[in-house]
């Protein structure tokens, strides 16, 4: 299985002092997860490419587009802002191949995501084209939701299909749920509230890592 990666999600951070917030977790973060919502695909609207450009960190930016039909120019804005990887949603794109091709042509890591109720069948044709699959373990849109356990069989099947692919989980991730997802094949863990909601963010990350590194 690929290396374990921790991706603190800035959706749960104080965006007014984002660089200070990121600095606190940099040492133990493998990625910084940046949720982009357009108010159409999911009701809330969040930050944009201009905001992403203000982020100052050496940790790779994992940009998650919860955006209806993102255009090439829209995606390019995030590439120019410093995205390391860009995730699109299968449900948000009429033909995800269009967005996948554009991201890949720009030599950026490419990922596709599915919501908890979306069958895995819908993305099987893209598995050989992407660098990562993001399985949403809550309904996208809000931080602090509970992990949906019915997503576990998808993680398990994905890992059987693609032993070397990064499988990311996002939603309700804490030390306990991270371990459940890890045991079924996930290796990239997006955690928002369980990191930024704590006073000691480093201790929070270490707690997740300690549980993931325990032998089963």
Image (cartoon, rainbow, N blue to C red):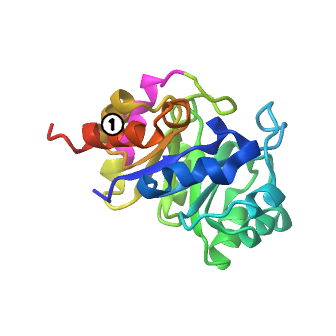
Using residue 176 as the reference point, say whether residue 104 is left or right of it: right
| Above or below for 11 versus 130 | above
Q: Residues within 10 Å of mark 1 (few under 14, many from 20)?
A: some
Residue 128 counted in the magenta span: no
Asked whether residue 177 appears in the rendered view, the answer is yes
Q: Which residues are magenta?
A: 146-158
Whole-percent x, y for residue 78 in the image: 75, 64
Q: Residue at x 30, y 49 (%)?
A: 160
- Residue 36 in view in this figure: no
Main structural element of the magenta stretch: helix, strand or loop? helix
The picture quadrant where one finds residue 56 is bottom right
Task: Please tell me which residue is depicted at 58% across the width and 42% down the height of the picture.
Answer: 114
Looking at the picture, does residue 71 appear above or below residue 147? below
Q: Residue at x 58, y 64 (%)?
A: 110
Q: Is residue 88 above or below residue 199?
A: below
* Residue 193, image x, y percentages: 55, 31
In the picture, measured across the screen, residue 164 lies left or right of residue 42, that is left
Residue at the spot of label 1: 207
In the image, 140 versus 105, the foreground residue is 140
Image coordinates for residue 175, horizontal then vertical, percent = 36, 32
Any magenta on residue 147?
A: yes
Furthest-top residue in this view = 146
Question: Residue 122 vs residue 45: left or right?
Answer: left
Count of picture labels: 1
Task: Kindly identify the residue that appears in the image at 84 percent across and 37 percent down.
Answer: 40
On the image, the x and y values in percent for residue 179 come to 31, 35
């Amino acid at each position: 299985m690929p290396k374990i990666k921790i991706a603190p999600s800035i959706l749960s951070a104080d965006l007014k002092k984002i660089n200070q917030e990121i600095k606190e977790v940099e040492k133990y973060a493998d990625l910084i997860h940046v949720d982009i919502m357009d108010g159409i695909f999911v009701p809330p609207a969040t930050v944009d490419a201009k905001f992403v450009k203000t982020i100052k960190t050496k940790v790779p930016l994992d940009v998650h587009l919860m955006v209806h039909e993102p255009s090439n120019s829209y995606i390019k804005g995030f590439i120019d802002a410093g995205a390391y990887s860009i995730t699109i949603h299968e449900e948000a794109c009429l033909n995800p191949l269009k967005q996948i091709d554009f991201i890949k042509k720009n030599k950026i890591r490419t990922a596709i995501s599915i919501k908890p109720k979306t069958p895995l069948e819908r993305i099987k044709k893209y598995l050989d084209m992407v660098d990562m699959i993001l399985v949403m373990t809550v309904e996208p849109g809000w931080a602090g939701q509970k992990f949906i356990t019915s997503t576990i069989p998808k993680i398990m099947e994905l890992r059987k299909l693609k032993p070397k692919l990064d499988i990311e989980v996002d939603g309700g991730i804490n030390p306990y749920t991270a371990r459940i997802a890890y045991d079924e094949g996930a290796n990239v863990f997006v955690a928002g509230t369980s990191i930024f909601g704590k006073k000691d963010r480093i201790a929070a990350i270490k707690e997740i890592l300690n549980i993931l590194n325990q032998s089963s």
